[in-house]
């Protein structure tokens, strides 16, 4: 295994805008990825297996609920720190970042924001430490971009709720200890329920034969007359806005994470261009390769500034859903384009597992689709600037 020689591009000296805490958090995550992720991730991706042993390390670097207050086991960090952690983890692998994003923004966040104090104290410290792992059940087989059409439902049976339905494309599902599940009550109102592994009628079959996110565990959530205790209902918020609020947090993390994948592809291509000799000189000395590399670092720089400003707005509580959608859409598209260009710089070597580029490219094909497709985010921006909703 080659050593991880990654050096992050910082063309506009963005580090000067970061606090010392930001840099310490970022550097700790970067060091962990170099030590514990880079040496093993290609093998796990080739085998389509999630490296369970890294869960403890993710917890140690604060990747689980970094912005959750310390009293509930979180690190109590700001939103820029959260973004930087996601950037560094996705530099290692999008699937590993997905595991952290789901745990933080789609499991811990709704319990913290919408749960009661008993739920916070019961679940959050164990989720922060990695003792418990969670997943998020919103997407259904027939309802992806239109989650309001969900058919998963629960009925009040007096001393418990009876949950029925199914969810699909659920990261962490095969090994999750709990699931935050969104379902409709008798009146058709969407609520969040905490479903625990071991509840009768609850199963999580794994999804196989993926070409993307191969080092991430993906599955289904099946509910067949599952008895859910009434105290497992999240009481703080209902309606579609509740799960969408969680997705805002996760999409924000993706906007940073995609920069990490792009950085890794760029750094790999830049290094290769200086070492690969053709026609008696490094290919990096040719105009066409310099064009590719110059455009890559330009787009990364623009994405860094977009994410940083969004982080400032998040810290101030002023970031809108539409602003988050713009950053998620732009930065993932940027990363995909850079992965494809970087692969060309490496020629045939770019498709091998000796380099990370093809793995990033395949992973990003999922990232550009999940938590709001590329097209849906475009329409969110369009609706925001025109006032017209094109979804219907």
Image (cartoon, rainbow, N blue to C red):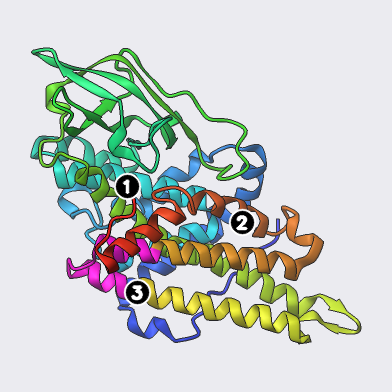
What residue sits 39% from the left and 78% below the top? 305
Does the magenta run of residues contain 326? yes
Magenta extent: 308-327
State the image coordinates of residue 133 (x, y, percent, origin top left).
35, 37
What residue sits 20% from the left and 44% below the top? 242
> Horizontally, is 237 left or right of 123 in the view?
left
User: Please, what secondary structure does the residue beneath circle 2 have?
Assistant: helix
- Could one spot residue 225 in this view of the protein? yes
The residue closer to the viewer here, 131 or 328, is 328
Q: Quadrant of residue 63?
A: bottom left
Q: Residues within 10 Å of mark 2 (few under 14, many from 20)?
A: many
Vertically, is 241 above or below 195?
below
Quickly name the residue at label 3.
308
What residue sits 27% from the left and 60% below the top? 388
Quickly name the residue at label 1.
392
State the image coordinates of residue 142 (x, y, percent, origin top left).
41, 31
State the image coordinates of residue 205 (x, y, percent, origin top left).
47, 23
Q: CA distance from mark 2 to mark 3?
A: 24 Å
What residue sits 54% from the left and 65% below the top? 335
Question: Is tag 1's residue or tag 3's residue first in the polypeptide sequence?
Answer: 3
């Amino acid at each position: 295994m080659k050593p991880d020689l990654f050096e992050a591009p910082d063309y506009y000296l963005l580090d000067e805008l970061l606090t010392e805490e930001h840099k310490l958090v970022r550097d700790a995550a970067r060091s962990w990825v170099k030590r514990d992720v880079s040496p093993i991730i290609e093998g796990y991706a080739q085998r389509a297996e999630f490296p369970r042993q890294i869960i403890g390390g993710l917890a140690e670097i604060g990747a689980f609920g970094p912005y959750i207050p310390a009293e509930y086991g979180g690190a109590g960090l700001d939103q820029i720190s959260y973004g930087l952690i996601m950037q560094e983890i996705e530099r290692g692998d999008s699937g590993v970042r997905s595991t952290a994003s789901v745990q933080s923004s789609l499991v811990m966040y709704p319990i913290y924001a919408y749960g009661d104090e008993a739920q916070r104290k019961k679940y959050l410290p164990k989720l922060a430490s990695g003792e418990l792992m969670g997943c998020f059940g919103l997407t259904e087989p027939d309802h992806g971009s239109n989650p309001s059409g969900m058919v998963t439902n629960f009925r009040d049976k007096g001393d418990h709720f009876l949950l029925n339905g199914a969810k699909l494309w659920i990261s962490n599902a095969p090994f999750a200890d709990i699931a935050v599940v969104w379902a409709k009550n008798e009146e058709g109102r969407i609520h969040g329920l905490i479903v625990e592994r071991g509840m009768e009628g609850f199963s999580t079959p794994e999804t196989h034969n993926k070409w993307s996110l191969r080092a991430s565990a993906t599955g289904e959530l099946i509910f067949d007359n599952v008895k859910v205790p009434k105290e497992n209902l999240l009481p703080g918020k209902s309606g579609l806005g509740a799960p969408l609020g969680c997705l805002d947090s996760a999409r924000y993390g993706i906007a940073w994470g995609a920069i990490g994948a792009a950085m890794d592809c760029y750094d790999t291509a830049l290094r290769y261009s200086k070492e690969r000799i053709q026609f008696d000189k490094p290919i990096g000395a040719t105009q066409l390769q310099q064009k590719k590399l110059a455009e890559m670092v330009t787009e990364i720089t623009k994405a860094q500034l977009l994410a940083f400003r969004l982080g400032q707005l998040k810290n101030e509580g002023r970031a809108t859903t539409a602003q988050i959608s713009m950053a998620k859409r732009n930065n993932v598209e940027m990363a995909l384009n850079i992965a494809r260009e970087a692969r060309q710089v490496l020629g045939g070597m770019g498709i091998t597992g000796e380099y990370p580029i093809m793995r990033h490219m395949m992973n990003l094909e999922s990232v550009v689709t999940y938590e709001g497709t590329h097209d849906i985010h475009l329409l969110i921006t369009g609706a925001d600037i025109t006032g017209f909703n094109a979804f219907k």
